[in-house]
Amino acid sequence: MSASMLLLIVLALAAIGFVLGRARALSSAGGDSRFLHSLPSYYGYNVALWTLAPAVGALLVWLVVQPLVIERSASGLIPEDSYAGPGELSLIMSDVRRVADGLDAAVATGVMSAEEAGAVEADATDIRDRLATVGVALGSEVSGATLAAAQRYRSLNATGTLARNVVVILLALTGFAWAYLRTDRDYRARNTVEKGTLILLIGAASVAILTTLGIVLSLIFNTIEFFRLYPASEFFFGLTWSPSFGGGSELGILPLLWGTLYISFIALAVAVPIGLFAAIYLSEYASPRMRGIIKPALEVLAGIPTIVYGLFALLTVGPLLVNVFGAGGVLGVDWMGGATAVMTAGLVMGIMLIPFVSSLSDDIINAVPQSMRDGSLGLGATKSETIKQVVFPAALPGIVGAILLAASRAIGETMIVVLGAGAAARLSMNPFEAMTTVTAKIVSQLTGDADFASPEALVAFALGMTLFIITLALNVFALWIVRKYREQYE
Amino acid sequence: MTDATHPAAAPRPGRASSILEQDARTKKRNAAEARFKIYGIAAIGVGLFFLVVLLFAIVRNGIPAFTQTFIEVEIALPADRLDPDGNRNPEEMKKVSTFGYKPVIEAGLVQAIEAAGIEIPFEDKDDVADILSAAAPAQVRDMVLANPDLVGETVAFRFLASSRVDGYMKGRVTRDSLVRDKNLDAEHLDVADAMAEAGMLERTFNWSFILGADASESRPEQAGIGVAMIGSFFMMLVVLALALPIGVAASIYLEEFAPKNRWTDLIEVNISNLAAVPSIVFGILGLAVFIQIAYLPQSAPLVGGLVLTLMTLPTVIISTRASLKAVPPSIRDAALGVGASKMQATFHHVLPLAMPGILTGTIIGLAQALGETAPLLLIGMVGYIASNYPDGIASGFMDPNSAMPAQIYEWAKRADPAYYERAWGGIIILLLFLMTMNIIAIILRRRFERRW
């Protein structure tokens, strides 16, 4: 019985519980709901909740824990001298899982009987061919240890699943019976149901914390694993980035950080002046009607997915820049070799950030009290003088916050740099050269064929950690500034 | 008599200006004012200019992907080659691979072209078959295996033209650009021109781009975005089914019930920070937690949906809280006053009133998730050729698939102008979806939002 089937059964039980609980409460009051403590349906919800909550909770925990336990037990059967590191072990274990799944598939499709599949250990020679007939392709011959582990995996899995089904259904029935038997005209069903609902609400609110925790833990563990294989000092201070999957790679983060900061700098150099002036014009000069048209139009730029900007950089802006700055271009200079360059990615990212800067600055400029403007205008300042000498200084901290948020967005942006910035890690000052960034390398290190336990793949987690910490610091700082600034004028 | 005897109308000395005539300093200040205003207009102009250029580039480059060049020819299907045993048994006819069909098609094409009175300028006349897509033999083979009785007859086929011929018809490929291309020669284009005149070659709307599956790297003319669209659809189902209830529940707790304490503050700070975490980090989370620890299948829309849910949750929570906050306290007070519990007041009165705002926020969150690419790359939704439609609902969630933005990225990576065209075309479809969703959100807001 699969987990979804089990869930359906529990749900059906809960639905029955609702009907029965409601009926029992009503009959205990002699059919007159005025004698009940709560409204009749609360008694129904009470039974349904007691049926559902413990059973589904147990099911979820079981679904997470069972694979971990089985994995540990099965990997104990692989002799320790047959693999060199955790990487090879994980490869062997994925073979084990595939063999086990293949045997299950063979039983399910009727190629083998259940007994046959269980006894396959004895003649391990033809297992690969037989599994191929059910569509499970194995890379290499199956060794005895792998097969033994696969059998252990299968038997544990079968036992675990059976136990899970029994436990979950028992829990559901117990909850059902417990709540049903307590259903009575004086039972405070509403209070129980509301307490249960509140717990569910708190649980939902905690998902945010769990997500952060998940991010931090998955980054930390893999980063520690990486630093065990590769010295941290070389990662943080190394000047070359040249991963080679054969080993002997140099994984210095500095060229990547340089590329990231350079591209972000160009992006901000495009977005900040344009965004800021647009925000000033919209909030101080534009008529409400003009504002109503232009603001949404600019915000369309923010709603366009980044993959579109990436393609725009690679196929439109890049070739255009080559036509201007490349060999034989309009300017007659030979600065740019290919379409992918820091300038390409930076320019396009700048376009993407314009609405980000302009919307945030617009809000902040609007929050400056009108009395300050009136005072300045009353003294005879022109509108632009008022803006430059009164409104802008007053809004400055908030605008700095907005720019920092934009910077954090630029640093974490992935698709534009993956497509537009190039793949070569370089420490160079020339903005027309291809460089690469932290995010682009996270993608390339994790989407290759690398083994997850090699330093070349694990480095992506260290890069992700660096990225997470930089953007988090920027965000916290920026939000703090913005909040502090808002309070000042409220 | 104290008639004032002011010196009438005598201009005061030392004052060079009047209201009617500006002095140099005022002129300078006014000029600065005008300049400042122009800067603002210029900034807006540049922003709008970029928007127009972007949209223009998308439309101009993407529209050709929606049409495709087809070649219509009648091909004789000789029985001795396609069914050597002669008993029309599909199982035995499967032994003839697509390589066996290729010469049949070549012969048929040469015959048809010569019958139309077009001269074939090649030494080996079979070379002319390069104008057909590499998918042609498989197309004929599938057709023959489905209808074994066709063998021995002459059947009219509608083949895809190769991507180079298609590009030539769309003006993307020129004779000069073919000089360095080993797939096709300029002579092929002469034949194609003549065939177009003879009506054997036509360019029509290409449904298979919208509905079809992805194809291998060498057959751009066959690639479509349909399967990736299904993948995106299943992901959006997961996001909707998880992000809406969890987001609404979390917002109700934070807005209506949460006491002011450390735990609540922690949750609040967490949510605002999660909203600004780079999307790629969510991809790392998905890879580490869902694939490495929980052993969910790689490339599955379920995993993509889970990752995108976590990413969308902050958006949904923030907008839901805003619309809960907009419901005036008098509603709650009235409900509590007639004896409702706090929970009843919230669920029976506040929540329904906040629903339009919540739905708007959810749709915008979904649109954001639909366009997101980076986290999907890390959980393996790229590099995979999405060639099969899922068999059912379960396989739709669990089987490897791609998603629209990931498919577009995949095409952009293939570095073939024909695939670039498809990437742009895919973007048009993606943007149409996003536009529809945003318009629905705006209509919902306009139609149902109440101002208190």
Image (spheres, rainbow, N blue to C red):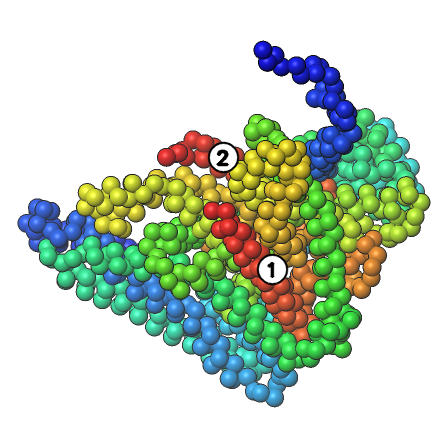
Q: Is residue B382 visible?
A: no
Q: CA distance from mark 2 to mark 1?
A: 32 Å
Residue farthest to the bottom?
A81
- Asked if residue B299 lies left or right of residue B111, the reply is left
Q: Which residue is mark 2?
A: B442
| Image quadrant assignment for residue A83 | bottom right
Q: Dot 1: within a 10 Å radius of its alpha carbon, few (fewer than 14), some, or many (20 or more) residues?
A: many
Q: Quadrant of residue A380?
A: top right
- Which mark identifies residue A474? 1
Give x and y (percent) for residue A488.
51, 50
Q: Relative to A69, say whether A490 is above or below.
A: above
Residue shown at 13%/53% (left/top)? A37
In the displayed structure, B178 sits above or below A212; it is above
Residue depicted at x 76% and y 24%:
B13
Q: Is residue B419 left or right of residue B343?
A: right
Which image quarter is the N terminus of chain B in? top right
In the picture, measured across the screen, residue A64 lies left or right of residue A438, that is left
Residue B41, x across and y down, in percent: 69, 33
